[in-house]
Amino acid sequence: MKIAFIGLGNMGGGMAANLVKAGHEVHAFDLSPDALARAADNGCATHTSVREAVQGAEAVVSMLPNGAIVDSVYGADVIGQAPQTALLLDCSTIDVATARKVAAAASTAGYAMVDAPVSGGIAAANGGTLTFMVGGDDAAFARAEAILAAMGKTVIHAGGSGAGQAAKICNNMILGATMIATCEAFAMAQKLGLDPQVFYDISSKASGQSWSMTSYCPLPGVGPQSPADNDYQGGFAAALMLKDLKLAVAAARDAGSQVPMGARAEELYEAFAAAGNGGLDFSAIIRTL
Ligand code: NAD
């Protein structure tokens, strides 16, 4: 299949390479010459603009930084430029309202579009093991599934347009809040004289258990290997967690939903990033407790 891929950064670079490995003809564009050069090394055809990359495409995949960029790229250079038969898939993490607005504009112009944000970081993007949460109608999901399966291990239909983004930010709001709660508990357990490994052995099998504890323990040397064991390098940057929490809190405001824990997690990650820690893995917030 001829697929245009827009946004070949940390995530998109590996995803485009996996589409090539699956036998697709990938036409890539990124504003960064370095990102484009890496895409060429990975077997993509490179282009000098979005408009050029989407010519003749059967599908367009994007992995861009934020909603404003997604809106402007689709509005100016994809809708009306790609063939109307092309399926449009935005895999970026953006706000629900913009995802719905862009999909509605695409639909008015005769295109099928899905929002398909991912769970999993750079390693999962490179390894083709992402989880995709997909928003769109049944027909668009059926077309999207095979394309996304070449870049991930799980593809889930979350509901109509915007539902993928809604699932993503609700999930990451749980993640941000449970990570802080887990960090607090480990810090307090030690102050109360508990051995952290003993506390892990108890809580990981008791009702305090969560993914933040058993798959991504914020304390070095406890639980499975995690960024804590690598001085909080790599993993999921605190700045990206803050971005997702801001999206979640804004969506809650729009929906009239009460999210006191999510809002507090946003405040704490805001302060953590403002202190110069945005590039550290998000579990490093334990250092502030
Ligand atoms: P990134 O900054 O590494 O990559 C974004 C790329 O988009 C860059 O190469 C940039 O040059 C390009 N770009 C920006 N504007 C453009 C335009 N107008 N036209 C073409 N290219 C343009 O970011 P990333 O880490 O790859 O994240 C991409 C998306 O994936 C974000 O929405 C992020 O929230 C989401 N995400 C990231 C992770 C992660 O661990 N990094 C995990 C899950 C989801």
Image (spheres, helix red, strand yellow):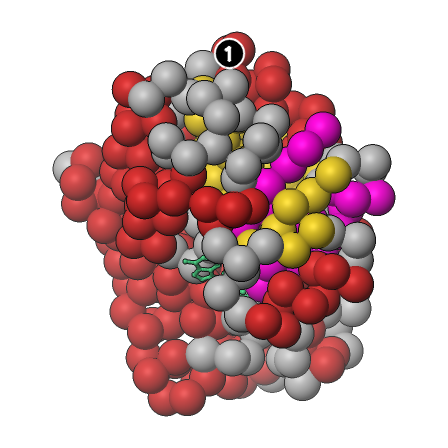
| Mark 1 lies on residue | 138
> Where is residue 163 shown, x and y percent of the image?
40, 29
Q: Quadrant of residue 149?
A: top right
Residue furthest to the bottom in view is 275
Along the line of sight, the residue nearer the viewer: 119 or 10: 10
**Residue at the spot 74% in from the left edge and 39% down from the top edge:** 25
Residue 270: tell me if it is visible.
yes
Residue 193 higher or lower than 9, as above or below: below
**Residue at the spot 29% in from the left edge and 53% down from the top edge:** 68
Residue 198: tell me if it is visible.
no
- The quarter of the picture where the C terminus appears is bottom left
**Residue at the spot 52% in from the left edge and 11% down from the top edge:** 139
- The quarter of the picture where the N terminus appears is top right
Amino acid bearing label 1 = Asp
The answer to whether the residue bearing label 1 lies less than 8 angstroms from the nearest atom of ligand 1 is no
Along the line of sight, the residue nearer the viewer: 222 or 243: 243
Query: Is residue 17 located in the magenta-colored stretch of the structure?
Result: yes
Residue 57 higher or lower than 217, as above or below: above
**Counting other residues with Cα less than 10 Å from the Cα at mark 1, is it few (<14), some (14-19), or many (20 or more)?**
few
Q: Quadrant of residue 270?
A: bottom left
Residue 283 higher or lower than 241, as above or below: below
Along the line of sight, the residue nearer the viewer: 37 or 237: 37
> Where is residue 9 shown, x and y percent of the image?
58, 63
Looking at the rendering, the stretch of residues picked out in magenta corresponds to 1-21
> Where is residue 90 shown, x and y percent of the image?
48, 40
Q: Secondary structure at mark 1?
A: helix
